[in-house]
Amino acid sequence: MFGLHNGTGGDLVSISYLDNVKHFKEKYEFKFVKPSDDTGSRNIDLYIYGDSYMLEIPDSAFTGVHSYHFCRRGYQDMTYSLDPHKKNILIIEIAERFARVEFELQETMRHFNKKKPDVSSLQLSVPPIIYAKFPDLDIFNPDINRNLEFNLYGYRFWDQVKFAKASLTYYLFKRAVGDAVVSDDGNRLFLKETMAETGRASSYYPFDPPEVRQMFFQLNATCAYYKADGFDEVYLSIIPNPVTILRPQHYNGLIPALQQADSLKCMRIIDIYGPFSREPDPGKLFRIGDTHWSNDGIQIWLNTVNAELKKQNALAEPK
C-alpha cells in the first residue's frame, strides 16, 4: 500500500496532504457480527489469498467455517496443510487495479503453496560451490535520490507546509496534489492511476482479446493447480475500483469480461461488481478519501461470500 503520514481521513487523504479538509475526515471502522444463519455446523476450512480489503475481517464474520487462514498479497507467503476431513475452499481476492498484472504473472502460485513434508532421510554433505563475482563498481547507491529527498524534506515542519499548500489548491481549484484526483463535485478523492488514459491499473484503459485470453489461461491454470493440490473449490473475487462504480462512463468492462463462466473452466465467481453497480446509492460503498470500501461495501461482500459458504457447508455435511 501507500507510505502514509499520520492522517485520519484515509489513504488518499494522506498521500494528497488533505488532512486539514474537514470534509474528508471519516471514521475508519467496520462492524462485524456473527452470521445469523451460522447454525454451528462447521465443515469448511477457508483460505483467502487477498489484499488490504480483507485485513479487518475476523473469522467470526464467516458462516460454517472451521478454520480461517489469510495471506496478504505482496506482504507475506503462506504454506498450507489441508485437512482431508474438511471442505477446503480458496478465495483469490484482488482489487481491480492489480488484476491485469497479477493474472499475467500468476503471482498467487509463487506465494501460496502447500507445506512440504519433512525429510528425515540421510542427507549427503556436499561442499559448497563458490562462484566468481566481479566487485560492484557502482559509485552511488541506487536509492540515493530517495534518501536525499527524505533527508531534505522528511521533517515534520515540512508536513505543515504541504498541508497548507494542499488545502489552498483544493479550496481554490478543487484539485488534489500527488496521486489523488478530486471528483467533479469536489466531495470525493480517487486514485489517479485508476482514472488514467493509459496503464493497466486504470478502469478506462482498454484491453484487447489476446490479453483477456491470456488472463483466462492463467486463471484456469491457477485453478487447476490448487484443485490438484487438494482444494475442493477455488473462487475468484475482484473488488471494483471506486471509479468503476462511481464514474462508470467509459469503463473498459474488465470485471464482467473476466467473470464469464464459460471461459473459466473450474473457478467459481464471487460477484461484487453486479450488486455494486446496481446499488441505488453507490457513493456509500466506498470511503470518500480512501481507495477502500466502506462498511456498507464490505457487508455486501460478506453477505455474498456467506451465502456461498452456506451452500458449500451443507454439501460437506456428513451423510
Image: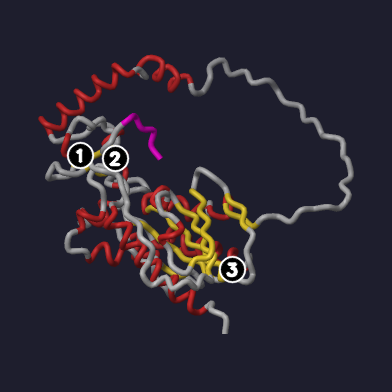
Residue 63 in view, yes or no: yes
Determine the secondary structure under disc 3: helix
Callout 2 touching callout 3 (CB < 8 Å): no
Which amino acid, by three-letter code, is at mark 1?
A: Phe
Q: Position of residue 190 (x, y in %)?
A: 25, 44
Q: Residue furthest left?
A: 172
In this view, the residue in front, 269 or 314, is 314
Callout 3 touching callout 1 (CB < 8 Å): no
Q: Position of residue 109 (x, y in %)?
A: 57, 55
Residue where numbered disc 1 is placed? 24
Specify the quadrant that holds the C terminus: bottom right
Main secondary-structure element of the magenta-colored stretch? loop
Residue where numbered disc 2 is placed? 10
Specify the quadrant of the image occupied by residue 221. Answer: bottom right
Residue at 15% in and 32% down: 170
Q: Is residue 246 above or below residue 265?
A: above
In this view, the residue in front, 7 or 226, is 7
Residue 250 in view, yes or no: no
Residue where numbered disc 3 is placed? 227
From which residue to which does the magenta span run? 1-6
Residue at 49% in and 23% down: 143
Which amino acid, by three-letter code, is at mark 2?
A: Gly
